[in-house]
Amino acid sequence: MAPGPDRPTTAPDLTDDIVLLAAFLLSSAHGLLDEPPAYGPVRCADGARRALELLDAYGEPDPALLSVRTQLEDAMCGSMADVDLPSLLRTACEQMLDVVTARRTGAPHVPATG
């Protein structure tokens, strides 16, 4: 195989954290084979929270993404019995869509308030 163009290197700490995220996702998938169906959405939300945590640690801070991560952290750290999971996920998805749309169009993203 012919060598391709130089690939950017990833910082060792970021590489380790991505490996841990992949391990979390795989162990979650494996656990879901025997866990109640309601665990799936929570595990996916926690995976998203962990990914946003990595982005915050290694990337440029984005207030909109920090807002999503904070909402997810608040839900994950408290009693899940008190969390309206469908509403939390709907809101987080809408906020992520705003961020993705703004990034794809090159428009500055202004987080919604309220």
Image: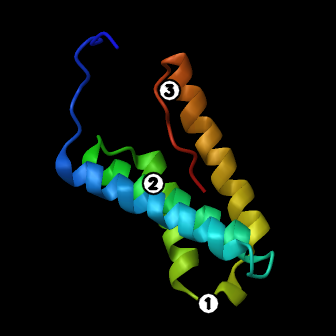
Q: Is 79 situated left or right of 40 in this image?
A: left
At horizontal 33% and vertical 51% (from top left) the residue drawn is 56
Q: Amino acid at mark 2?
A: Ala
Q: Nearer the viewer, residue 2 or 71?
A: 2
- The residue beneath circle 3 is 103
Residue density around tag 1, few if under 14, some if 14–19, many if 20 or more, within 10 Å: few
Residue 89 rendering spot, x and y as whole percentages: 70, 60
Residue 62 rendering spot, x and y as whole percentages: 38, 44
At horizontal 74% and vertical 80% (from top left) the residue drawn is 34
Against 44, is 2 above or below? Answer: above
Label 2–label 3 contact, CB within 8 A: no
Q: Is residue 19 visible?
A: yes
User: Element at badge 3?
Assistant: helix
Q: Is 47 situated left or right of 84 in this image?
A: left
The answer for how far apart the CA atoms under marks 2 and 1 are is 22 Å
- The residue beneath circle 1 is 79
- The residue beneath circle 2 is 51
At horizontal 52% and vertical 43% (from top left) the residue drawn is 111
User: Element at badge 2?
Assistant: helix
Q: How many dots with numbers?
A: 3
Against 93, is 2 above or below? Answer: above
User: Element at badge 1?
Assistant: loop
Residue density around tag 2, few if under 14, some if 14–19, many if 20 or more, within 10 Å: some
Q: Is 93 situated left or right of 58 in this image?
A: right
Residue 83 rendering spot, x and y as whole percentages: 69, 79
